[in-house]
Image (cartoon, grey):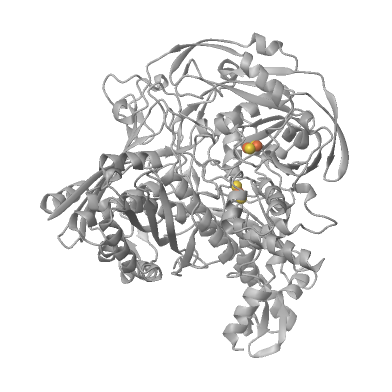
């Protein structure tokens, strides 16, 4: 065996480091029912809370009568806005610079809005009592359509903002207007459009959806009156930020606030924000001096916490006759609901939407996003994507197809003609991003070969001739993930870095703690692999902990695929600090100078003398008893990592769909997903993340939608109506990869778990629309339910033909 | 509210006795009275299957069964799958094939898979998909769940051949 493959064997097989498909460290507890999720937490004397919610989309509250509820045996309190007012907690800041009513203050602005909280001995009594709270409403006119919200005489949704012409993101021009965000050079783009040989334009709605993790949101708040300490267990993807916010709102010193995220049953962006239920449960615990548990029901989850998308977009491309794109223009009407409770970095009201030039070298671009209030649930979170990247990717991937159709060019060919070329990296986009690395043509070519693309197109032509509907959808997306850097990204003023703290014990085992928080992404497994490779001790003896803000170093949490780009980088650099100290200890033990040593994966060896070496295990022991003069004992390191840039994972996806022209039923026959996330830490985990993200993309494209009627009533917010595919509908996934490391990340890794969602949605969409492309169809709105597709088929008269 | 009744049943091979209100759901009896929190709750409309338990040899959604209906029953939950410190092949399969991520759906799906393989010891992939279609998973995209059930089927088959 040569040296390189020996090192590889040591790293992968012995240490189970980077590259090993190691089984998950989390699994033994989960497969034996020993996970500890929020609703599993039971404290002595704990009470249960239940929200009373508005049945109306927009109404004035005339009175709230809590007498009957309070009269029910077992009920301890019913809190309303009036109880929170003396504490100044009836409103709270949102992450987006807006404020949100914690409990409705005189009026409700969306169906399901929090009006009162009942606290009782058990959840049954709490539910009974919630029904006994009598609220008298006077209904007001409702606006659910963002296009109508800006009409001069549209109802005023946010009376609390009366007279405020300046919002957190600049001027407000109308009572239902939140912000206008512009990026790019409008004049330059307009000039190109004015002279272009070809232009295309398409309007498209990215419907309102919900991340709906299988576990809903919840918390257990426990205030200790004697010590003046508050402990909050909650389903948070960002527990440190919650601690800071709770300390700021409550006035309790941050050192006396203990926030703990236990095991989390999926997040997908749903568990980033701070919700009224958490706040009122905390107040209830402070008031009553007893622990209070509040856990959402599914219907509450789907109808109140954290919707995503609701972007109404118009995309335009200017190109030459060969399909070379010269300019892009995008306009978005962004429906944020009744409060702007988007979970984006503070200075980014439309998140990273400016990644909408995608994988293409587009010389001129301009994008504008107008944020609007409507009488719908608040939010605008990143559902399995970096902030608004899914929307951005969708508009460009759709527009490239529209352009190809207009020019009668092949959809793969148009992409190849416009890709940023490998030699252009690092690449600065016309909307200001510096793409770190990529090789787009190689990725797409690999997919086209693997699926026999030209064979598929031939088959499609034959099918079309027979009147059958077959679509081939491509998506060659680029994401931007891993926020910071600190200088551009913050949450409520806290810079977006992340952290790792590691301690090596005398026996050579270790514990490492992080500021991120897994919700199923296997951090306990993969962070240990990074550390194993960096430090040279087996990942099996490296314990990873996250979520307890008392013990973990401060961090901004897990969303926007930021754990590997930031926490993973922090792990690598903390590991290197350990190794540097270890080198000095080894030099001391071997009585040579540190420069005479070389790192061998798990030991320091005197250069060229293999039997003169000290393993990390030996060095760890020495760190506690035999150190060089003047060195402090122990072997520990901490790293707060401020990324120099974001990372830009990419992929090439291809979807083949057959649509039954009599029933409208779409059947995904094939889905081929090639991802490039740079260095691959655990191939098994990556593949699992890809499968999961694709399934969620399938759900969004094929069935998910939160629909409001004109009265502001949400039409179906349970798993009865809101589409979550089962194993039967979910397609079979084929995965593939290329590796283009990130040049600025310590181990070359990028984020991965959101790529399949970002790239997947447009691949499904492009496939379905491609099935109708030969009939002049350039766009169809998601979700592609059989009913919706059948209507199109019927309009086109396709179902009438014989055969 | 009603008076509490004494309720007796067998849970994972052990006789248990609890006081429960007539309206109390089985899932709450298991989780809150008996502290068996492996069985989860993901909805209130009987759709997600996170609460699946085995009741008298059938998979049921314990959020849709009253505690009192379990009087005298034999119940198996995720906590009862492993025997004598040895994982059940279904559990082993889930770990080997990476069939779980957040783990919230996992107990319900495994308990269902356990019963399903009794009903159909040699299923096709399609039959597996149908067999677990009462259970939703938001994380895995199901493909590895199918593999895990297949893994367990093979392992159980091999054990039967040995016996
Ligand atoms: S909890 Fe969802 S089916 Fe029982
Ligand atoms: S593993 Fe998270 S819901 Fe299935």
Q: Residue at horizontal 57%, vertical 15%? A: A82
How many numbered discs sit on the rendered protein? Answer: 0
Relative depth, front residue between A318 and A626: A318
Residue B45 occupies which quadrant of the picture? Answer: top right
Relative depth, front residue between B41 and B13: B13
| x, y percent for residue A94 | 48, 33
Residue A331 occupies which quadrant of the picture? Answer: top left
Is A640 left, or right, of A26 in this rendering? left
Q: Residue at horizontal 77%, vertical 58%? A: B87
Q: Quadrant of the N terminus of chain A?
A: bottom right
Is A746 left, or right, of A337 in this rendering? right
Relative depth, front residue between A109 and B85: B85
Query: Taking B15 as reference, is A282 above or below it?
Result: above
Is A659 left, or right, of B84 in this rendering? left
Relative depth, front residue between A802 and A189: A802
Direction bottom: furthest residue: A608
| x, y percent for residue A766 | 34, 52
Query: Taking A443 as reference, is A295 above or below it?
Result: above
| x, y percent for residue B126 | 56, 55
Residue A761 in view, yes or no: yes
Q: Residue at horizontal 71%, vertical 32%? A: B65
| x, y percent for residue A300 | 56, 30
Is B151 left, or right, of A663 in this rendering? right
Q: Residue at horizontal 45%, vertical 40%? A: A704
């Amino acid at each position: 065996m040569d040296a390189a493959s020996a090192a590889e064997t040591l790293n992968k097989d012995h240490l189970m480091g980077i590259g090993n498909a190691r089984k998950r460290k989390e699994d033994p507890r989960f497969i034996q029912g020993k996970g500890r999720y929020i609703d599993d937490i039971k404290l002595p004397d704990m009470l249960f809370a239940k929200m009373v919610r508005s049945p109306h989309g927009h109404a004035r509250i005339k009175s709230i009568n809590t007498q009957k509820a309070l009269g029910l045996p077992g009920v301890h309190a019913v809190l309303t806005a009036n109880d929170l007012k003396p504490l100044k907690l009836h409103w709270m800041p949102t992450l987006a610079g807006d404020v949100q009513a914690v409990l409705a203050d005189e009026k409700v602005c969306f169906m399901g809005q929090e009006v009162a909280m009942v606290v009782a001995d058990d959840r049954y009594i709490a539910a009974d009592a919630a029904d006994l709270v009598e609220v008298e409403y006077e209904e007001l006119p409702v606006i659910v359509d963002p296009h109508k919200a800006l009409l001069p005489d549209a109802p005023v949704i946010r009376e609390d903002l009366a007279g405020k012409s300046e919002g957190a993101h600049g001027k407000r021009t109308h009572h239902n207007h939140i912000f206008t965000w512009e990026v790019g050079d409008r004049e330059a783009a307009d000039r190109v459009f004015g002279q272009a040989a070809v232009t295309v334009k398409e309007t498209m709605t990215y419907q309102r959806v919900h991340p709906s993790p299988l576990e809903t949101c919840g918390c257990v708040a426990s205030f200790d009156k004697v010590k003046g300490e508050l402990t909050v267990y909650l389903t948070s993807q960002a527990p440190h930020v919650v601690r800071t916010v709770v300390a700021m709102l409550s006035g309790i010193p941050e050192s006396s606030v203990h926030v703990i995220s236990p095991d989390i049953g999926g997040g997908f962006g749903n568990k980033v924000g701070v919700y009224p239920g958490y706040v009122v449960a905390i107040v209830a615990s402070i008031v009553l001096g007893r622990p209070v548990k509040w856990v959402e029901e599914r219907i509450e989850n789907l109808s109140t916490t954290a919707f995503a998308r609701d972007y109404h977009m118009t995309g335009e491309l200017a190109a030459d006759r060969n399909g070379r794109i010269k300019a892009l223009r995008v306009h978005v009407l962004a429906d944020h609901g009744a409060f702007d409770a988007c979970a984006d970095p503070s200075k980014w009201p439309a998140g990273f939407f400016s990644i909408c030039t995608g994988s293409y070298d587009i010389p001129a671009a301009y994008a504008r996003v107008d944020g609007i209030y409507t009488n719908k649930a608040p939010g605008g979170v990143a559902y399995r994507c970096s902030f608004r990247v899914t929307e951005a990717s969708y508009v460009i991937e759709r527009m490239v197809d529209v352009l190809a159709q207009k020019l009668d060019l092949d959809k793969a060919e148009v992409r190849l003609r416009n890709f940023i070329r490998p030699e252009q990296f690092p690449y600065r986009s016309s909307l200001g991003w510096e793409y770190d690395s990529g090789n787009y043509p190689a990725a797409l070519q690999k997919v086209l070969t693997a699926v026999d693309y030209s064979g598929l197109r031939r088959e499609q032509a034959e099918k079309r001739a027979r009147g059958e509907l077959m679509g081939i959808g491509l998506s060659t997306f680029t994401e931007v993930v891993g926020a910071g850097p600190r200088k551009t990204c913050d949450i409520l003023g806290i810079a977006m870095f992340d952290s790792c703290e590691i301690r090596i014990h005398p026996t050579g085992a270790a514990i490492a703690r992080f500021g991120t928080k897994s919700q199923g992404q296997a951090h306990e497994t993969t962070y240990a692999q990074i550390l194993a490779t960096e430090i040279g001790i087996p990942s099996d003896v490296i314990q990873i902990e996250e979520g307890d803000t008392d013990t973990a170093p401060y961090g901004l949490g897990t969303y926007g695929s930021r754990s590997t780009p930031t926490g993973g980088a922090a792990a690598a650099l903390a590991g290197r600090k350990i190794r540097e100290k270890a080198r000095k200890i080894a030099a001391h033990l071997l009585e040579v100078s540190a420069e005479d040593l070389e790192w061998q994966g798990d030991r320091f060896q005197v250069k060229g003398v293999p039997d003169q070496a000290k393993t990390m295990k030996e060095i760890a022991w020495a760190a506690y008893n035999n150190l060089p003069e003047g060195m402090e004992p122990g072997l520990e390191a901490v790293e707060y990592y401020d990324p120099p840039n974001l990372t830009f994972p990419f992929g090439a996806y291809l979807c083949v769909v057959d649509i039954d022209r009599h029933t409208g039923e779409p059947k995904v026959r094939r889905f081929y997903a090639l991802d490039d996330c740079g260095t691959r830490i655990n191939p098994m985990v990556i593949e699992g993340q890809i499968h999961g993200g694709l399934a969620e993309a399938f759900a969004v494209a094929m069935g998910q939608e939160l629909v409001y009627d004109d009265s502001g009533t949400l039409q179906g917010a349970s798993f009865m109506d809101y589409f979550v595919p089962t194993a039967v509908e979910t397609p079979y996934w084929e995965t593939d990869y290329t590796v283009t490391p990130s040049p600025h990340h310590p181990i070359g890794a990028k984020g991965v778990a959101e790529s399949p969602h970002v790239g997947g949605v447009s691949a499904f969409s492009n496939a379905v629309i491609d099935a109708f492309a030969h009939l002049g169809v350039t766009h169809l709105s998601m979700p592609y339910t059989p009913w919706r597709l059948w209507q199109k088929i019927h309009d086109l008269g396709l179902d009438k033909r014989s055969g | 509210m009603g008076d509490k009744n004494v309720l007796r049943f067998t849970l994972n091979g052990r006789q248990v006795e609890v006081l429960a209100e007539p309206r109390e759901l089985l899932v709450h009896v298991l989780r809150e009275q008996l502290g068996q929190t492996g069985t989860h709750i993901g909805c209130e409309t009987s759709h997600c299957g996170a609460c699946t338990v085995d009741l008298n040899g059938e998979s049921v959604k314990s959020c849709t069964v009253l505690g009192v209906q379990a009087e005298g029953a034999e119940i198996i939950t995720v906590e009862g799958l492993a025997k004598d410190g040895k994982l059940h092949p279904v559990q082993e399969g889930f770990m080997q094939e990476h069939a779980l991520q957040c783990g919230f759906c996992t107990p319900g799906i495994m308990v269902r898979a356990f019963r399903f393989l009794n009903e159909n010891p040699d299923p096709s992939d399609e039959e597996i998909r149908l067999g677990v279609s009462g259970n939703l998973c938001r994380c895995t995209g199901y493909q590895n769940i199918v593999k895990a059930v297949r893994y367990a089927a093979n392992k159980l088959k091999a054990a039967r051949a040995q016996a």
